[in-house]
Image (tube, grey):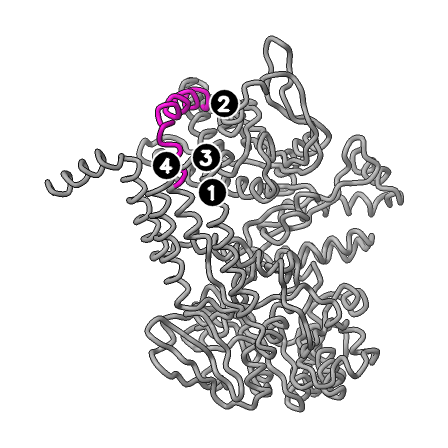
Amino acid sequence: MKRLRAVRRWFGRRFGYARLSCVVLLIGFAALRALDPPPVEELRIRVFDTFQRIDPRKKTIRPVTIVDIDEKSLAKLGQWPWARTTIADIIINLTSLGAVAIGFDMVFSEPDRLNPDRVAGQMRFIDEVTRTRLRELPTNDQILSDAIRRSRVVLGETGLAEVRSELDETLPTTGFATLGKEAEPFLYQFPGLLRNVPVLERAAAGRGLFNIRTERDGLIRRVPMLMLAQGKLMPSLSLELLRVVSTTPTVLIKTDEAGIKSIALRGLEIPTDRNGRLWVHFARQDPSIYVSATDVLDGKVPADKISGKLVLIGTSAVGLNDIKATPASSVMPGVEIHAQLLESALTGGVVQQPGYGIVLEFLGAIIMGLLVIAFAPRFGPVTLVLVGGLFASVLIGTSWFFYMNYRLLIDFTYPLLSTTAIYLTLIFASFVREQQQRRQIRTQFVRYMSPALVEQLAQAPERLVLGGEERDMTIMFSDMRGFTSISETYKSDPQGLTALMNRFLTPLSNAILARKGTIDKYMGDAIMAFWNAPLDDKEHHINACEAALDMLERVDTLNREREEEAQEGGHVYVPLNIGVGLNTGTCVVGNMGSDVRFDYSVFGDSVNLASRLEGQSKEYGFPIIVGSTTALAVKDRFAILELDFIMVKGKKEPEVIYAIAGREEVAHSGRFQRLRNLTIEMLACYRSRDWEGALAAIERGRRTDEAQTLQYLYNLYEARIRTFQQQPPPDDWNGAFALLTK
């Protein structure tokens, strides 16, 4: 230990402590790259995303056709799911047109609700002879099973976050063989597995998981080709299609000490990463490979669109919530991800990250880092910039060369970042004292103002003048529910009420600031905040919604703490609840006030609407209500539920409002899908003025497990419908809303 301190002192005197810090920094960056935590990996893959955006895969052949359950098909055939006989007709038509194989990007996990025996049990006013004849008819599932058996069909299955039922071990599965170490420890695992009804499973030529895992930022880059679901090794839907087409009885998995290397079928070997994922070389979204499901049923699809092709059946309809994002396209139906994967595998259009790439990265970082440590203090700023630009160009050019010519992913960000960090450490070492002084000033002012605004003012004091600018912003209003009743319990303890409010507002404020929000003002128990000012925030819609959900979570944590304190202290516990309104639109933001005193604030119609939406949260029974612009901007990242139209002062047309029920994982949950279907059914009847149908939909909903969540919404619509039944509303929206507010 003494020798180490002596060496450190000698190095500091001989070369300076800044250079010593840079050596430590170089070692630290090397260790960071070796550990490769998610943020480092995410930075690297964003570079690869840029390569794919610049040079997406060029399609030379189109071996896949997508039969699209699109808006046109839904408009003609009705809401999803359709009768299984309709699906059978699609399979029959595709088979007759020469489809090589057919894959379903969906699962038929329950018997068809339109099976004749089910219909017989549900219909009340038919005679027993008719009921008996219905029960004797073949089921829709059996008809679909027969169609599947006469073709080559791969059924989709899905991994679940929980076990729903025991697996039927008699159902067929795909065979696997492993060459090397066991593959299972490296694979993605799902606790549960959702399969199709047995009569369909036994008729299919194959079955595979259609789960597509997004990365941390929501993009699809690598698609698992193998997964474990409820203890079973399962192929992906795409891999199973390739297996069926190649007539390979068993999938061969090649592994080594690091993990999975590749997956082999008859005549085809697919390279993967260590977790069995395929790097897809994405092309841009290709509308030419889509055909409408209704056109297939009507026989309007040209034979060359189907003949000799792999056919995937999926959906691009926004309402069915299967929209993804890739490096090459920000909006792509999930079924096309499978199509692109098949195209990449069949045409050799995959990208790889070679094992020796990390060796090149380490060598580049160490050589460049040592050169900067040795020579940077001797050079002037212009020379440093020129040399740095040359090094950066060499690194980027080398990475681009490997990508363009060999489709290899060699990362240049790690050596570039480590060298840049060393350079900046040397340049700014002399400014440490000044930075400490600035931090003291920021610490004092950040208690009163947004940290982002304080930073801007510290760098540019001339901005402390009156004025404003137009910006596209997201506005938040939040308020405590039942504040009056809560304050009643503190009549004799005003200090306690003040402490409670501080304890309540602190975590909510922290949630807003943590998601890049700016707090405009506090109004008693209410908070007004906004996003995308004073600093630009391209994801202000998403950050605002994340902040709202964080606020709900923090209030739940606070309630649990207060409940425990109430039990221990023997006093009354009243839970705290909040309502949040979010709206996105053009606002005027800036320093508002007088020459003597002014605040950084925002105003406009969008602000007024956000305030009104917050007030609607109690009426509709959902804590987070958002406007249509916000909902459309975040629909791929959150569980969005349409609620109603409301009239806004100064506008002739109503505003569509939505509820945010959770994040993306909630959107994919079965419970949310049921909630969504219940509201869609009710709203469809209500807006078509089918009052009886809407009441029937409400009554059905009240008999479900989701009734408690929707009770406020149901009560609201039921009251409206009763009003409209007594006095039919006029055709115009203003007149209809005027009738409700008499």
Q: Residue at x 79, y 78 (%)?
A: 297
Whole-angstrom CA distance, mark 1 to mark 2, is 33 Å
Q: Earlier in the sequence, mark 4 or mark 1?
A: 4
Where are the magenta residues, as a range? 423-446
Q: Earlier in the sequence, mark 2 or mark 4?
A: 4
Whole-angstrom CA distance, mark 3 to mark 4, is 10 Å
Q: Position of residue 349 (x, y in %)?
A: 58, 73
Location of the C terminus (image quadrant)? top right
Q: Is residue 705 visible?
A: no
Q: Main secondary structure of the magenta part?
A: helix
Q: Position of residue 590 (x, y in %)?
A: 64, 23
Determine whether 44 is above or below 740 in the image.
below
Q: Position of residue 536 (x, y in %)?
A: 60, 36
Residue 458 disc label: 2
What is the three-letter code of the residue carrying label 3?
Answer: Pro
Residue 584 disc label: none
Compare residues 226 and 681 and report the one nearer the observer. Answer: 226
